[in-house]
């Protein structure tokens, strides 16, 4: 057992959990934030994607203990403080970038990671950055469109 | 899917790592965890203790001089992929790192972890061998040609930790890989490095581990041109057949990728 303390979406969350606890389980069961999903058992699907210390990671593929003392941002931390939707969320809604929604939190977190690195990404760059996020419903087309729109919105276009 | 119980401890220094590994024979060092944690979740490995290297800043440096690029063992793939300084001197190394896994894996995965794990389909072993690298550990320096000894097996002794990998800067080099479309691991990856005085060609993904192709190295050493590789075939006898590909096809891919790697360096006139 270990005491893990991680700042999640700006709030310090401190829990005592088994050493083998994955970061995704700390987030879901420790912090009660179930927007981050477990979609596979091979760390391939990306439904568990969150930001750790500013960078996108697969929360199912590391121990919570590795993130001890760090800062995590999940899908629940994306909307603005006043509750209004972030541009990426507006764009996903506008362009029907989700159907069942299971991959969506991961897609959004990866998209934000991409736009941090490449504020005006090409279609190729978008597709490449989503290499680690699988979707079984949409065929990705509207996901890419959503991200292109979000990029334009965030660039002030 | 759930891993067996394990203890986790963050190391405060390299010396601390060595103490812990010596005290616990079933302990494993934990770098980025992108292979180790995944493997533990599938119950493919079950160490008693994970010695977390994540806090060891002294292992995260990138050093470049006239002849070498030295990566600290905990340098993440994303750092190498995004490094303008590395892209300037060994663009093939930056490209190789950029092609590993996906962006999330690259934010965590490390060169030390990849090299120590020696997955037969990993990319870094090709760079280590083709770029005539030296692996520095807590006890010695190991030459590339001596480092990779078998499937998931290296020359590292129990308790020995990689601290850095030092790559020679070539005149020009290229790495091409034929990705498994699902896992993005190398079905075949070929790294060609021209040092002027000699050429080194390293292949991953096709066999139990990385190997050099002496015939290709000699031919390219005489004349660095794709046509020099005409008629050179790697025997499929020692190559891997699995659900992704037959040995014969892997042999074919090696020849194709080697030629394309050389062409990318000769035809455009500039490094890839």
Image (tube, coloured by chain):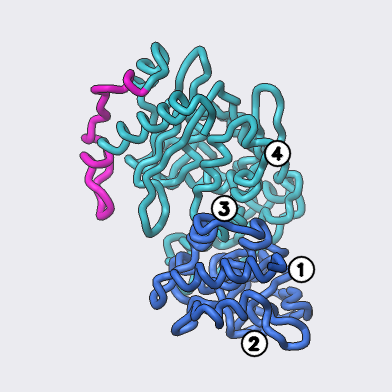
Chain colours: A blue, B cyan
Give the chain of mark 1.
A
Q: Which residue is mark 2?
A: A32
Q: Which residue is mark 1?
A: A69
Residues flagged by tags 4 and 2 on a common chain: no
Return the x and y of residue B91 as percentages of the image width and height.
Answer: 57, 35
The reply to whether the C-beta atoms of the residues labelled 4 and 2 are less than 8 Å apart is no
Which residue: 43% across, 72% down?
Answer: A135
Q: Which residue is mark 3?
A: B25
Q: Disc 1 and disc 3: Cα gap in Å?
A: 28 Å
Q: Which residue is mark 4?
A: B62
Residue B75 lies in the magenta stretch: no
Q: Disc 4 and disc 1: Cα gap in Å?
A: 25 Å
Q: How many marks?
A: 4
Which of the two discs, 2 and 1, sits closer to the camera?
Answer: 2
Q: Is residue B24 positioned above or below A1 on the image?
A: above
Nearer the observer, A110 or A21: A110
Which of the two discs, 3 and 4, sits closer to the camera?
Answer: 4
The 10 Å Cα crowd at callout 3, few under 14, some 14 to 19, many 20 or more, is: few
Q: Disc 2 and disc 1: Cα gap in Å?
A: 18 Å
Give the chain of mark 2.
A
Residues flagged by tags 3 and 4 on a common chain: yes
The reply to whether the C-beta atoms of the residues labelled 4 and 1 are less than 8 Å apart is no
Region of the chain picked out in magenta, as a range: B226-250
Residue B246 lies in the magenta stretch: yes
Return the x and y of residue B86 as percentages of the image width and height.
Answer: 64, 36
Q: Is residue B191 positioned above or below A5 on the image?
A: above
Which of the two discs, 1 and 3, sits closer to the camera?
Answer: 1
């Amino acid at each position: 057992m270990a005491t893990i303390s991680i700042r999640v979406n700006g709030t310090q969350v401190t829990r005592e959990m088994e050493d083998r606890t994955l970061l995704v389980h700390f987030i879901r069961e420790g912090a009660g934030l179930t927007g981050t999903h477990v979609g596979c058992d091979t760390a391939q699907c990306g439904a568990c994607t969150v930001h750790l210390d500013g960078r996108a990671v697969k929360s199912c593929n590391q121990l919570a203990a590795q993130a001890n003392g760090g800062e995590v941002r999940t899908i629940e931390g994306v909307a603005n403080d006043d509750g209004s939707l972030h541009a990426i969320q507006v764009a996903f809604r506008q362009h029907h970038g989700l159907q069942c929604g299971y991959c969506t939190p991961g897609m959004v977190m990866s998209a934000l990671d991409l736009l941090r690195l490449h504020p005006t990404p090409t279609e190729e760059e978008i597709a490449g950055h989503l290499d680690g996020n699988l979707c079984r419903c949409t065929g990705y087309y509207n996901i890419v469109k959503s991200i292109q729109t979000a990029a334009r919105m965030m660039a002030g276009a | 899917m759930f891993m067996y119980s394990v203890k986790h401890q963050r190391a405060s220094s390299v010396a601390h790592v060595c103490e812990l590994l010596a005290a616990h024979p079933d302990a494993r060092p934990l770098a980025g965890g992108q292979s180790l944690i995944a493997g533990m979740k599938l119950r493919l490995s079950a160490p008693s203790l994970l010695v977390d290297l994540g806090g060891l800043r002294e292992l995260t440096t990138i050093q470049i001089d006239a002849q070498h690029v030295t990566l600290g063992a905990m340098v993440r793939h994303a750092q190498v992929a995004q490094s303008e300084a590395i892209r300037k001197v060994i663009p093939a190394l930056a490209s190789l790192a950029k092609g590993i896994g996906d962006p999330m894996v690259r934010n965590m995965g490390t060169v030390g972890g990849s090299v120590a794990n020696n997955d037969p389909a990993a990319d870094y072993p090709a760079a280590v061998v083709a770029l005539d690298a030296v692996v520095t550990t807590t006890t010695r320096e190991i030459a590339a040609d001596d480092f990779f000894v078998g499937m998931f097996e290296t020359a590292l002794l129990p308790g020995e930790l990689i601290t850095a990998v030092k790559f020679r800067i070539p005149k020009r080099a290229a790495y091409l890989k034929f990705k498994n479309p699902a896992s993005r691991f190398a079905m075949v990856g070929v790294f060609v490095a021209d040092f002027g005085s000699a050429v080194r060609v390293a292949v991953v993904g096709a066999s139990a581990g990385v190997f050099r192709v002496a015939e290709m190295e000699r031919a390219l050493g005489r004349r660095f041109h794709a046509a020099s590789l005409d008629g050179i075939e790697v025997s499929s006898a020692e190559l891997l057949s699995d659900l992704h590909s037959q040995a014969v096809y892997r042999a074919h891919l090696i020849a194709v990728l080697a030629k394309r790697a050389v062409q990318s360096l000769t035809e455009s006139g500039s490094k890839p």
